[in-house]
Amino acid sequence: MKMKSFPFSGKTVWQNNKPFTWFLLSLLLIYSVLKIIFYNYNFSLLFTGDELSNSPAGTTRLIKWSLANDLLVILLINSALLLLLQASRLVTPKITNWFILPAFVLLNSFAILLNLADIFYFRFHFQRANADLLYVLDHPFEQLFHQNIFIIIAFFAGIAGTLFLLWKLHKKFIASFSDGKHAGLLTGIILFCIGLAVLFKTSFSKVLLPSYPLLEIRSKQLPLVQNSFHTFLYSVFRKGEEVTLKDYLPAATCDSLFPLKKTLQINNGKTAGKSIVLFIMESVPYDFFDPASPFKVEMPFFDSLLQKSTFFNNAFCYAHESNKGIVAILGGIPTLSDIPVYHSQYINIPVTPIGTALKKNNYSSFFCIGDDYDNFGFAKCMNWLGVEKYYSKQDIPDYKNKPTHSMGLQDEVVLDFMHQKITELKPPFFAINYNVSTHYPYDLPASFKVDLPKRYSSPMKSMCYYDQSLQQFFNAAKKEAWFANTIFIFCSDHWMFPEGVKGEYNAVTGYKIPVIIYDPSVNEKKTSERMVSQFDILGTVLATAGYKDTVLSYGGNLLDSNSSSGFVFSKTGSSLYQVTDSAYVLGFNSATDKAEYLYHYKKDGGLKEDLLKNKNALPIIEALTIRVKAFIQKASSHYKGRAVN
């Protein structure tokens, strides 16, 4: 007589759980292929200088954490599937076909497609998907349709293929439940693990952190091993909140190094009462203005303007997203959360609302953009900052028949409308223009037929168009009575690749932006070598207006050289910050509380030699680390509601 095999023998366990095992391995293979594509497409952004370790141990760590994160996502999603399938057998099998099967096909598809989309979208914000995606969701899809036709076809083929493959995998796996035996052991194991996780919730919660691999790898390598669904889900679950209170230094030391409340130098009243026009330039890098750069653009308007303006050639942006740039420029504060401050729980932290402050000095104010109303939440931001009026493309007469860009109306149309609105105002006023034509995908109006060099990239061509549009605005504006008594400020919202989205990234040049101040009554060429940032714009505007009250700002006043600290700060990822002085740049990870790199960029422009382990560089490391710690501590304290000094 043939004996029955023991129910928990290896062969029986394998046979009973083979469908689920193959199901998990198939998903893991899909994620691994996407990681390989992500690595090849974004290599220059992930690894700069000597950050890529070619050692077998380094490669092994990357593979280990990549597989671990992908497996974590697969199990988080499909453990729930497994438990629901077991429960549905006790109720009615119809639930499986009607609800459970479609729901988990879509959920797994969404997770995979997030990772697919991040291959291309990573270059626009330098980190994996997070809750911020919910606030810019329309534009990534618009940008997709301006990719190469083969990329678009591949993307939608990927969607169709993913849905088909997952449907087949799910159907085959679910069919194995018909006899009531398959995956029973796995279900028990998963329930047991959930029980352990509840008992040891503190340790388990650390494993769920998307930054957990920082135990063994560097922050620049982190996006390679992360899973986009994991980072997105974690960020949404925390409502975009990424702020952890830091107490690196004694409060008195931190306050002395980084005072936030300050009284502005009014420049002897020379500018008090003058109107101000601020041009926030979308995605305009310093490279376009740098004579030594291969991406220097011939711009008749700007080239002429620089002969009679103050040009800051060491200006830096805070981050690579527009919603962080606008808060830095107009609010004078950093964004620490994933989502914009004006969408977050931190909306009530102390700030100096620029519009409200200017109103005390009898200034009217308005914001003008060619985009849809409140796109990126900018209308909410202006209301938060006390700016009185908000004009979008819907406010421009006959806007549906005007030249368009993927992001809205072309700059020439919006600047003409802005000129009309300014002329209707009684000085003094504060007018803000946020242009869109220099934003990806850089599509230009048919009327722009300037003969440009063949070497010009799409971003460079769009800058030529913006230059022409500004020339038209100034040609009209200089005929107005208000022009001579107005100061014009130009500042980019963030850096972007001058050669296009497949360009290379540098931890220093990737944050350099142009900042220009033009005063027609001065009409003098100046170049400032000072280290300045977007945080300095708020103080400059209020000082220009003669504002005398205390200002809360992370910057100073561009018109007052004594207000410059000599250091600028940037946020390059979810937890990585940079401090840059006139010669060095240091990266500091607030998750591990450790410095990650140090470069002498004045001598080593390509950032090839990391000086972090160089004993001779220890004084520089300590000095810059204290500065960035003071910045992070002050900002986290500010966000957490502690008294601001």
Image (tube, rainbow, N blue to C red):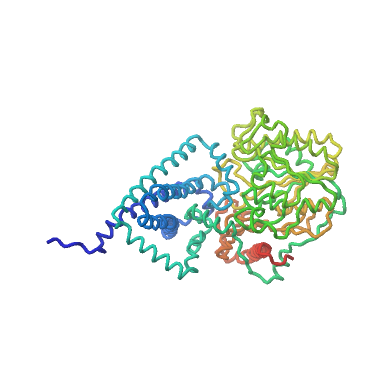
Question: Closer to the camera, 558 or 326?
Answer: 326
515 lies above or below 627: above
Q: Position of residue 509 (x, y in %)?
A: 62, 49
Q: Position of residue 23 (x, y in %)?
A: 35, 52
Question: Closer to the camera, 627 or 429?
Answer: 429
Q: Quadrant of the C terminus?
A: bottom right
Left/right of residue 309 with respect to residue 170 in the rendered view: right
Would residue 5 be visible to someone looking at this image? yes
Q: Position of residue 80 (x, y in %)?
A: 42, 57
The residue lying at 80 percent from left, 60 percent from top is: 550
Q: Quadrant of residue 196 in the image? A: bottom left
Q: Residue furthest left?
A: 1
Q: Quadrant of residue 185 in the image? A: bottom left
Q: Residue furthest front?
A: 91
Would residue 55 be visible to someone looking at this image? no
The residue lying at 70 percent from left, 42 percent from top is: 434
30 lies above or below 4: above
Left/right of residue 188 with respect to residue 485 in the rendered view: left
Q: Position of residue 602 (x, y in %)?
A: 64, 54
Question: Closer to the camera, 261 or 267?
Answer: 261
